[in-house]
Image (cartoon, helix red, strand yellow):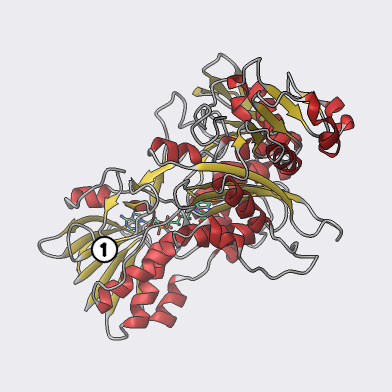
Amino acid sequence: MKYVIIGAVAGGASAAARLRRLDEQAEIVIFEKGEYISYANCGLPYYIGDVIKDRNALFVSTAASFKQRFNIDVRTMTEVIEINTTAKTITAINQITGKQYEESYDKLVLSPGAEPIRPPLPGISSDGIFTLRNVADTDYIKSFVQNKEVKNAVIIGAGFIGLEMAENLFDLGMDVTIIEMGNQVLAPMDYPIAAIVQQHIRSKGVNLLLNSAVTGFEKQGANLKVNLKNGEELEADIVILSIGVKPDTKLAVKANLKIGEAKGIWVNEFLQTSNPDIYAVGDAIEFTNPITKQSMNTYLAGPANKQGRICANNIVLGNKQKYIGAINTAIVKVFDMTVATAGTASKNLAKAGIKHIVSTTHSGSHAGYYPGAKQMSIQVAFSPEDGRLLSAQIAGYDGVDKRMDILSSVIKRNSTIYELTEFEHAYAPPYSSAKDPVNMAAFVAENILSDRASVFYWNQFDSISDKDIVLDVRTKAEFEKGYISTAVNIPVDELRERMKEIDPDKNIYIYCQAGLRGYLAQRILKQNGFNNVLNLSGGYQVWETCTKEISKTQNLAIRQFSNLSSVNKIK
Ligand code: FAD
């Protein structure tokens, strides 16, 4: 058997190594148009930022070590330019010698990755404007930063890589501006969690411009001028374009392989393309999202590596292992914060017509009485029918990763918030609380599903009429520091005595700081004959963060959850 692989980083290198482990006799050739194989793309921003100091640490394997350990013929600096599916050959060109040649295959694996998007804006090819995709890009950026006087950095695009670059350039001492066309950072996440991240970024002194489009660049001496649609101009010494990527399908298109709805290489559940002798993995492919059932791309290292392994299994052992799709579990460090997501955000569930309920909870990273606990905010979305967990997003400082891994596992297994209520975690005060933050998120969700708790959301205050009551159940001191427009203040601890001040026939919208005291107040009122009582999910904290962020971006049109729905309408 002869296996040929195109692309030697995440998916390709993983497939090649697994192929060898399964088939010692096979001939395996891997082509890579770049200079390096199997390197850590995910570490590149941190090398630029001097967090990773040794460049060699980025290289997980080399062509020589791959040859020695796996007996794989690695052809770096060699681009595959064509696939002949009838003859079962590929045409490659050695970029150093210019030599062009053909190589036959029995089975071919495509893992060419994704290409960064570079919109055709005036001046986009100017010196000092970079994209970051590979080691060569990294070396250019690193040398530019080291050899020029670089003070002002402009990052275009506030996705995962954009935010990582913003932090790393900021930590190198630059003044950083992030320009984002959308109304929030981290587009795959919902606004309330993104708003927490935005506040954190701004608190560090980074200039964050949302709803802002770049129209072009002009060279001004050694500097660049970045022009914005609203007429503003920014000075920059360096610009990083991180506005997204698209699947690299050039070879696949040329070879007449099927391209799917999401513009990625179409594969079946065994990661086999429309040609049975060609498999494809990684950023270049698309597959069915297990939650929305819509075709989608995933640009993440974990799925690419795992797909590489699965595809090798299917090639050698016959199509036996199905790839069930990725739920886009991702995590990013944003200065002191950790932000993570898994599953489909509420806004995208809504677009896909999937009914869901959203709930936000805030918990300590570990027991409050043990020093150093930090708050994390968890937003979950779950099915009103069976409690299936559909997405989870967390912003916090400590222990976010382990919570997200738990939540992701529940989502991936199509499991429910009911299971999560009983999730058994390893507990001692330095690590968690007897009820872990993920248990708490699930308890609240379970209360909502069982009608013990009814919630409304931060962006629904406009729907509240003058005839309704907005009840702030925090302490007087908290109330005096700031409250939501028409609220009256009855602290939860005084509620039993002062209940007669509230008209039981009115709709009552309760809020507290984080949601817990509001829930207690709701339980007191409901069990005393008040039927029309809702509690603000995530409390004043979520409302304050979101409204403050909206006022900064002057975006009054964020309505991610529909207006009061049947789930949360007062009956
Ligand atoms: P790649 O790893 O990109 O490999 C594709 C390779 O194919 C490239 O080296 C390319 O040169 C080669 N190639 C393409 N066409 C040809 C051809 N015709 N002939 C020969 N060779 C070819 N993901 C995470 O999950 N977490 C992170 O923290 C994270 N951070 C990232 C940071 C950066 C800066 C970048 C760029 C990506 C990051 N990612 C992260 C994404 C992750 O690296 C990718 O999802 C993953 O590498 C995709 O694997 P792949 O095999 O599909 O493509």
213 relative position to 194: left or right: left
Q: Is residue 499 above or below residue 290?
A: above
Outermost left residue: 86
Q: Residue at x 64, y 41 (%)?
A: 166
Relative to 542, say whether 438 is above or below. Answer: below
Q: Quadrant of residue 439?
A: bottom right
Residue at disc 1, CB closer than 8 Å to ligand 1: no
The quadrant in which the N terminus is found is bottom left
Q: Residue furthest right?
A: 477
Q: Residue furthest bottom?
A: 25
Measuring from the top left, give residue 294's x and y in whole percent: 33, 46
**Location of residue 287 in the rendering, given as x and y in whole percent from the top left corner:** 32, 53
- In the displayed structure, would residue 74 be above or below residue 96? below
Q: In percent of the image, x 44 and y 82: which residue is there?
A: 69
Label 1 secondary element: strand
The crowding category of the residue bearing disc 1, from other C-alpha atoms within 10 Å (few below 14, some 14 to 19, many at least 20), is many
| Quadrant into which the C terminus falls | top right
Residue 269 visible somewhere in the drawing: yes
Q: Which residue is mark 1?
A: 279
Residue 174 in sight here: no
For the point 35% across and 58% down, which residue is it?
96
